[in-house]
Image (spheres, rainbow, N blue to C red):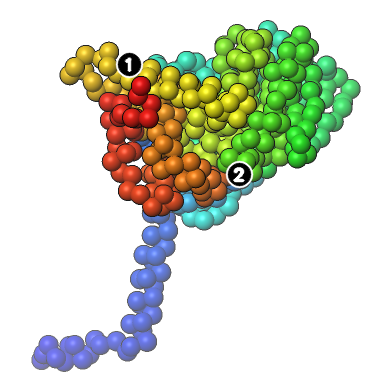
Amino acid sequence: MLTNQASRRHFRLPHPVLTLIGLVFFAHFAGAGIVLAQSPGDAGVDDPYFPNLGNGGYDVLHYAIDARFDVEANTLQATTVIDAQATQGLNRLNLDFQRIAIESVLVDDAEASFEHRNGELVITPAAAITEGQAFRVEVRYGGSPSSYPFQQTIADLGWYDLESHLVGMGEPAGSSTWYPVNEHPSDKATYTFRLTAPKPYMAVASGVLVERIAGLDETTFVWEMRQPMASYLTLVAVGDFVEISDETADGLPIRSYAPPNLVRRAESAFARTSEIIAAYEALFGDYPFETVGGLVVDGGFGFALETQSMPIYDGMIIRAPVEFSERFIAHELAHQWFGNSVSPASWRDIWLNEGFATYASWLWVEQSAGLSVFGSLARGSYVELRNSRRLTRPGDAKGPVTGDPGVEAIFDGEVIYTRGAVTLHALRLKVGDDAFFEIVRTYYDRFKFGNASTEDFIAVAEEVSGTDLNYFFQGWLFEADVPLIPELES
Ligand SMILES: [Zn+2]
């Protein structure tokens, strides 16, 4: 007879055996767990405006871009080495890269398979990468870079084949036209650019020129950006450039580059760089990078961009009267603090770049041309804003708002630049000069070399001023109507 009790007794296993079985089970499922945890990295970082920009699953630490250019043919042959750290287990990962043909991809020196389409380079490493692992991706490619249409509302971005020079730059996503990249400002990294150009051309990039290696027919220029840089701030240009060398009163090197026919103009346009830097250092804190300067190109595109440590200016700006070009230069230099050192957490936070740069250029006017010129600027901008919104038909008043403008208004002059700057001026009038500049310095100091969101700025403003500013920022940043500033009404 077999009773329940007997059978149980009979089949009861000694305790150490149970423990062993338990361990085997645990190890088995834990092992399965690791395999399951190695999933594909996302094809975007969920930016509220551009969800496909950037990629998930890793953090880039350093880019080393080695490129050889043919200026006449507009071609490059390049290898980009990316040192990164996995933030999840990865059996696949993406990089953003546009239209250049890829020759090979290595992950940790092993051949990896890849697919390349629609601006995404999808890499499957031979061996999966574990969470926290440091790994290296090496991409070899060559061809003719070109700009590409990025959203309907923003012009073609990235690579410019100009008559006598090549230029790579573009906000918010132009860098992927010439190197594979995690193209979102939330993943900042340091850079080495090793750029080879045929003689007599020069290759210029963001950062410090650390080496110039002369070959028989060509020259290699090695540039280092040793502070974190968002990819939309990288710059490369190859062409006939003359170096204009100077330094600030504090000994910060000023290195600017211009085509030979624009050197004189550039010298006078950049003449006050040292003074502008000194004014901003007194107001915001130390200049964040190792050099400062500007690159002038004859592009005919009519804009300037705050590329890190060396903003780029179209020749049209530099040819204009100094009063005009200086406003551009003051704006782009202010971005070195706001936008470049403190970068937006997402593209929704763009007013933190443009509002600050616009307001800083007014502060430069306040210092250089006097309080009355500043006053008329601030008042004029405020009145312009009020009038513009008054013209909107009733019931039609829901335009884009500064704190969440949407893709269409991301670079809107009125909504982002003017209203961003007037918002800061309104804050200054509300909390007073001392608290206002303490807010700006604290915000810069807390988020320098990193990223900040609108919420981060509001939190600093409330903390430093000891004031509840919820109602204030709600009105200025998130409602279409322009709040009243009694001080500016006349
Ligand atoms: Zn700007």
Kind of residue sitting beneath label 2: Gly
In the image: residue 357, left or right of residue 276: left
Q: Position of residue 129 (x, y in %)?
A: 51, 51
**Quadrant position of the N terminus in the picture:** bottom left
What label does residue 302 carry, if any? none
Give the camera-side residue of 194 and 404: 404
Q: Toward which corner of the image does residue 378 lie, by quadrant? A: top left
Does residue 30 show up? yes
What label does residue 387 carry, if any? 1
Residue at x 29%, y 34% (from the top left corner): 475
Give the camera-side residue of 472 and 137: 472
Q: Is residue 328 above or below residue 339?
A: above
Residue at x 51%, y 43% (from the top left corner): 437
Does residue 99 show up? no
Q: Is residue 341 above or below residue 26?
A: above
**Quadrant position of the C terminus in the picture:** top left
Which residue is disc 2 drawn over?
285
Give the camera-side residue of 32 and 313: 313
**Around disc 2, counting alpha carbons within 10 Å, would you say few (fewer than 14), some (14 to 19), or many (20 or more)?**
some
Residue at x 12%, y 88% (from the top left corner): 4
**Which numbered disc, 2 or 1, marks the residue that appears first in the sequence?**
2
Real-space Cα distance between discs 2 and 1?
35 Å
In the image: residue 357, left or right of residue 296: left
Kind of residue sitting beneath label 1: Asn
